[in-house]
């Protein structure tokens, strides 16, 4: 993956022909998060190609060699894994719900902090609920 980032970025400046560093980093972050939620649902070849590409930072040529397939086939395995992860997220929305839950928890922490001076018992109750919500993750 670092090789991919290097091809998109040089000297810390986004390569204008490649769409920019932020886009690549955002996609990588998203793919890794979706993999955490749905990776076990991928087929063996797609999962392994994804892991080699995103988690072990291998090039497509190295992935092809590791899987015993052509470079094009390795590319297809990675691309299809990405598409499958996106499809699963669109259908189930687990990652989006987790992000929303995290935002709500931050807001609840702010409410608890604001309540602390006026009503410590209410703040303690809110903090207890926050703890219960965090335990669900």
Image (cartoon, rainbow, N blue to C red):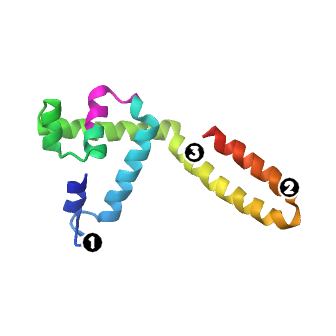
Whole-number angstrom distance, CA of label 3 to CA of label 1: 33 Å
The rendered magenta stretch, by its main secondary structure, is classed as helix
Callout 2–callout 1 Cβ contact below 8 Å: no
Q: Quadrant of residue 88?
A: top left
Residue underneath mark 3: 97
Task: Name the quarter where the C terminus is drawn.
Answer: top right
Q: Is residue 42 magenta?
A: yes
Label 3 vs label 2, nearer the camera:
2
Q: Quadrant of residue 54?
A: top left
Where does residue 62 sit, x and y in percent of width and height?
14, 41
Residue underneath mark 1: 12
For the image, the number of numbered tags is 3
Residue with the most extreme top position = 44
Residue count near mark 2 (Cα–Cα under 10 Å), binned few <14, some 14–19, many ≥20: some
Q: Give SS at disc 3.
A: helix
Label 3 vs label 1, nearer the camera:
1
Residue underneath mark 2: 122
Nearer to the camera, 99 or 11: 11
Q: Quadrant of residue 87?
A: top left
Q: Give SS at disc 1.
A: loop
| Mark 2 or mark 1: whose residue is earlier in sequence | 1
Question: Which residue is drawn at the image coordinates 46% and 40% (left, top)?
Answer: 89
Callout 3–callout 1 Cβ contact below 8 Å: no
Q: Is residue 82 above or below residue 114?
A: above
Q: Give SS at disc 2.
A: helix
| Mark 3 or mark 2: whose residue is earlier in sequence | 3
Where does residue 90 sit, x and y in percent of width and height?
47, 41
Where does residue 68 sit, x and y in percent of width and height?
13, 29
Question: Which residue is drawn at the image coordinates 71% and 49% (left, top)?
Answer: 130
Question: Which residues, given as a range, are shown in magenta?
Answer: 41-49
Whole-number angstrom distance, CA of label 3 to CA of label 2: 27 Å
């Amino acid at each position: 993956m670092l090789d991919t980032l290097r091809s998109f970025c040089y000297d810390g400046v986004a390569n204008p022909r490649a769409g920019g560093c932020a886009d690549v980093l955002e996609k990588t972050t998203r793919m890794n998060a979706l993999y955490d939620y749905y990776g076990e649902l991928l087929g063996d070849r797609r999962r392994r190609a994804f892991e080699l590409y995103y988690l072990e930072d291998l090039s497509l040529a190295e992935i092809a060699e590791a899987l015993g397939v052509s470079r094009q086939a390795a590319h297809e395995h990675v691309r299809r894994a990405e598409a499958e992860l996106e499809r699963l997220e669109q259908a189930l929305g687990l990652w989006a719900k987790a992000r929303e839950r995290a935002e709500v928890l931050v807001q609840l922490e702010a409410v608890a902090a604001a309540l602390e001076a006026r009503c410590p018992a209410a703040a303690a109750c809110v903090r207890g609920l926050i703890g219960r919500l965090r335990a669900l993750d």
